[in-house]
């Protein structure tokens, strides 16, 4: 995959739709919905960023993301509810390894919407986009040990554990252990066919 492809796709990031969700470009008007969860310590406990201190910070962050979209180097979607448009989190690609047709995905969800399958639904659509539209061969995801909610999402997506990197992330002064999971395009194709056969 070429870097030019990423610019072409993500400088005008497409809207993705699932049964219950719409994944779209993040906007400054999402500030209230994002701050609702981004301010919570329990949300950022297993992430590499700190809680947002106020809604002005969130709005400035979203405005900054607009400049990154413009140059095609931001790969996240806002996860919104199809029924009312509420933004409940983000999901997308955190990085690409273009020479090897590989990428990493990540997701964050407002805890008020945990347990409804939304994170899995959003991540599965991002996987589909990566494998079918971007022609990726491999997609991985990482979670800090202890983040059982994120690990369950990876299991539901059919990802396989590849290994654990002991104390490999220095986050807020503490070394954190990280587990890496992955899925190959051929495995996603098989999972998709299996799910269709059961529906």
Image (spheres, rainbow, N blue to C red):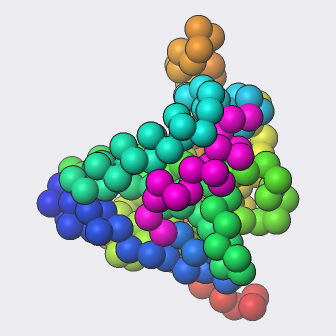
Q: Is residue 63 above or below residue 21?
A: above
Farthest top residue? 173
Q: Is residue 98 visible?
A: yes
Q: Is residue 169 above or below residue 62?
A: above
Query: Which portion, as a residue range, is magenta?
Result: 24-40
Residue at (62% x, 11% y) in the render: 174
Residue at (30% x, 63% y) in the render: 10
Q: Position of residue 96 (x, y in %)?
A: 33, 49
Residue 178's image quarter? top right
Q: Nearer the viewer, residue 45 or 176?
A: 45
Q: In the shown orientation, is residue 29 left or right of residue 136?
A: right
Q: Position of residue 184 (x, y in %)?
A: 47, 61
Q: In the shown orientation, is residue 23 left or right of residue 161?
A: left
Residue at (71% x, 46% y) in the render: 36
Residue at (45% x, 75% y) in the render: 15
The dominant secondary structure in magenta is helix
Q: Nearer the viewer, residue 97 or 62?
A: 62
């Amino acid at each position: 995959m070429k870097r030019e492809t990423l610019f072409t796709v993500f400088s005008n990031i497409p809207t993705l739709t699932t049964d219950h969700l719409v994944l779209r470009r993040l906007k400054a008007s999402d500030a209230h919905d994002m701050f609702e969860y981004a301010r919570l310590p329990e949300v950022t406990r297993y992430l590499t960023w700190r809680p947002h201190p106020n809604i002005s910070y969130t709005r400035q962050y979203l405005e900054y993301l607009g400049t990154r979209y413009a140059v095609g180097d931001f790969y996240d979607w806002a996860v919104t509810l199809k029924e009312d448009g509420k933004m409940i989190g983000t999901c997308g690609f955190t990085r690409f390894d273009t020479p090897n047709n590989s990428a990493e995905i990540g997701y964050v969800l407002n805890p008020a919407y945990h347990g409804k399958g939304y994170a899995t639904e959003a991540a599965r659509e991002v996987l589909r986009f990566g494998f079918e539209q971007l022609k990726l061969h491999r997609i991985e995801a990482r979670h800090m040990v202890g983040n059982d909610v994120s690990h369950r999402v990876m299991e539901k997506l059919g990802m396989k554990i590849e290994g654990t990197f002991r104390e490999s992330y220095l986050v807020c002064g503490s070394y954190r252990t990280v587990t890496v999971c992955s899925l190959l395009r051929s495995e996603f194709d098989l999972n998709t066919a299996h799910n269709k056969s059961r529906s």
